[in-house]
Amino acid sequence: MGRAAKTSIIAAFVSAAIALGNLPLVLADSASAEADRMMSERCAVCHGENGDGQGPSAENMNPRPRNFHNRQWQKSVSDETLAKAIVYGGPAVGVSAAMPANPDLAGQPELVAAMVKRIRAWGK
Ligand code: HEC
């Protein structure tokens, strides 16, 4: 086998290894990008684009949508509670029924986990 052929086989191996090695990272990235998009689409109207609970629909709500920057609240809730609120709505976790359910997300635990992570990031 010629030197050039050897080199190109090695190059193919290396790039395959890099591609495989990066796969989980790429998946994680796409879940978080999807979470951002979903939250902008479905949550920002109440919770605000930056999670402060001051979305355009929040003004006349009582109780107001949760402000995700509130650290005391962050400490008081588990990730499971957050996920449950997102999928099954406010009443499932003992808060306002104005917090809507998103039953279509029940089959997308990775996406819901990424949304929970996004909410947690606002509390830091
Ligand atoms: C129509 C307005 C509205 C929309 C849209 C909305 N929420 Fe809420 N959300 C609320 C209200 C109101 C509460 C309840 C606050 C309370 O009772 O203290 C709430 C509470 C929550 C809580 C706190 C649950 C707890 O245990 O304290 C989480 C988490 C949450 N929302 C996430 C989301 C996410 C994620 C989305 C988008 C998928 C979303 N919400 C969409 C209004 C909304």
Image (spheres, grey):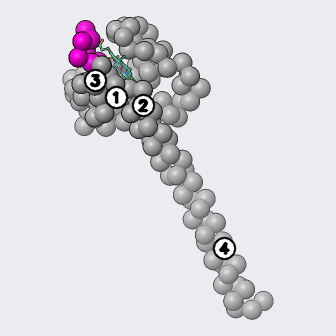
> Which residue carries the number 3 mark?
56
Q: Which residue is mark 1?
A: 44
Query: From mark 4 to mark 3, how far is it between C-alphas?
Result: 52 Å
Spatial CA distance of label 2 from label 3 is 13 Å
Mark 4–mark 2 distance (CA, rounded to whole Å): 41 Å
Q: Quadrant of ligand 1?
A: top left
In the rendered image of this protein, does residue 27 appear above or below residue 53?
below
- Separation of disc 1 and disc 3 at Cα? 8 Å
Residue type, mark 2 in image: Glu
> For the point 56% across and 59% down, which residue is it?
21
Q: Earlier in the sequence, mark 4 or mark 1?
A: 4
Q: Residue pushed farthest bottom?
A: 2
Label 3 secondary element:
loop
* Mark 2 or mark 3: whose residue is earlier in sequence: 2
Q: Position of residue 108 (x, y in %)?
A: 56, 30
Q: Which residue is mark 4?
A: 12
Q: Which residue is mark 2?
A: 41
Question: Could you tell me if the residues under marks 1 and 2 are in contact, i.e. CB atoms within 8 Å?
Answer: yes
How many residues crowd around disc 4 within 10 Å: few (fewer than 14), some, or many (20 or more)? few
Question: Which residues lie in the magenta part?
Answer: 58-65
Question: Reading the chain from its start, which is encountered first: label 4 or label 2?
Answer: 4
Question: Is residue 23 shown left or right of residue 119?
Answer: right
Residue nearest the observer in this picture, 72 or 97:
97
